[in-house]
Image: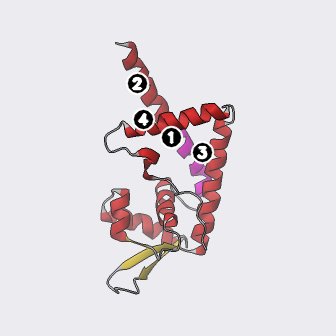
Amino acid sequence: MSDQRVQLERLDTLLRAVVRQLNRATSAHLAEYELTPSRFFVLQMLGRCGRCGGLTMGALQDRLGLAASSVTELVDGLVEAGLAVRERSPNDRRVVLVRLTENGFEVLNKSWEYRLQLLQAAVHPLAPEQLRSLLEFLELLLQGIPGGEAGGGDRGIGRQDPR
């Protein structure tokens, strides 16, 4: 087996391990709010639009790449937890919009801050130049994967201002 193949396999293992460990550590915090990692991701999607009036179920389905029934189940969980509401569009009563409640914004911000604290602890040993290099490497790696885009398409999904 070539040295490059061994390195690529190690890279794949490490990337999956980092994401898995970060999600595990975050899951314990999310459980305090009756959130799963999947529901947290939907919370982030809804928080991304801030006070835009909400997203349709179809828009969430497209952004998440999930079946309608899966999106419905995730949104149901957020609504039951009081983190989101479904409302009829004022422009077209046939359209149902999903948006965060004040509590949803609060939980999103607290959970995002917790996740950033985990990352801060993880990168603490790195010098600022090393962190910049790591970020540049990950951006390049993402761009090199078919369907990848710089920033992962997730810029701004963290902390949201509910005003």
The amino acid beneath tag 4 is: Leu
The answer to whether 112 is drawn above or below residue 148 in the figure is below
Question: Between marks 3 and 4, how big is the CA–CA gap?
Answer: 25 Å
Sequence-wise first label, 1 or 2? 2
Q: Work out whether 128 lies above or below 152.
A: above
Is residue 30 rendered to the left or right of residue 151?
A: right
**Where, by quadrant of the figure, is residue 145 drawn?**
top left
Residue 9 shows which numbered tag? 2
Q: CA distance from mark 3 to mark 2?
A: 24 Å
x, y percent for residue 82 = 55, 73
Looking at the rendered structure, the kind of residue marked 2 is Glu
Can you identify the residue that label 3 sits on?
Answer: 25
On the image, numbered disc 1 is attached to which residue? Answer: 19
Residue type indicated by callout 3: Ala
Front disc: 4 or 1? 4
Residue interval drawn in magenta: 17-32
Badge 2: how crowded within 10 Å, few (<14), some, or many (20+)? few
Circle 1 residues within 10 Å: few <14, some 14–19, many ≥20: few
